[in-house]
Image (cartoon, grey):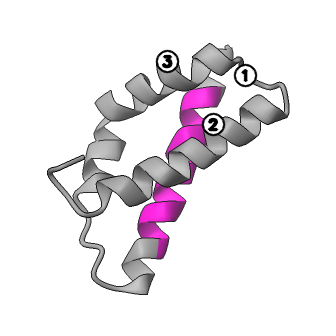
Amino acid sequence: MKKSDSAPIAINAINEIFVDEFLKNNIGFNDILAYLNLVLKDKNYIKTSMMPSNTLKNINKIDTAARELAYKIINKKKF
């Protein structure tokens, strides 16, 4: 996360999705960490975390891309 100002934005958005899915009983508590490890290794996360966060438009793009990645990881692991 120290490599980019955008990494905390992405991690926060991803965490919100994982916690929401846990609260809905769609994933287990321990799955949150497992999914987060998958996210950190994903090339789309790396690309997203390197995006500049100098405008609100870019911050929104980072947030949206991170949330999409979180759902992709969850859905991939369910099958």
Residue 48 is inside the magenta segment: no
Magenta residues span 60-74
Left or right: 45 in relation to 17:
left
Does label 1 or label 2 sit earlier along the sequence? Answer: 2
Q: Are marks 3 and 2 in contact (CB under 8 Å)?
A: no
Left or right: 22 in relation to 52:
right
Q: Are marks 1 and 3 in contact (CB under 8 Å)?
A: no
How many marks do you count on the picture?
A: 3
Left or right: 24 in relation to 73:
right
Q: SS class of the residue under badge 2?
A: helix
Q: Looking at the picture, which amino acid does disc 1 mark? A: Ile
Depth check: give the residue in front, 38 or 16. Answer: 16
Q: What residue sits right under mark 2 in the picture?
A: 18
Q: Label 2 neighbourhood size at 10 Å, few (<14), some (14-19), many (20+)?
A: many
- As drawn, the residue found furthest toward the right would be 24
Q: Residue at x 67, y 20 (%)?
A: 29
Q: SS class of the residue under badge 1?
A: loop
Q: What residue sits right under mark 1 in the picture?
A: 27
Q: Residue at x 26, y 51 (%)?
A: 47
Q: CA distance from mark 1 to mark 2?
A: 8 Å
Find residue 59 and report its horizontal and vertical position in percent. Answer: 41, 73
Find residue 5 and report its horizontal and vertical position in percent. Answer: 24, 63
Q: SS class of the residue under badge 3?
A: helix
- Magenta span: helix, strand or loop, mainly? helix
Find residue 35 and report its horizontal and vertical position in percent. Answer: 51, 25
Q: Looking at the picture, which amino acid does disc 2 mark? A: Phe
Q: What residue sits right under mark 3 in the picture?
A: 34
Q: Are marks 1 and 2 in contact (CB under 8 Å)?
A: yes
Q: Looking at the picture, which amino acid does disc 3 mark? A: Ala
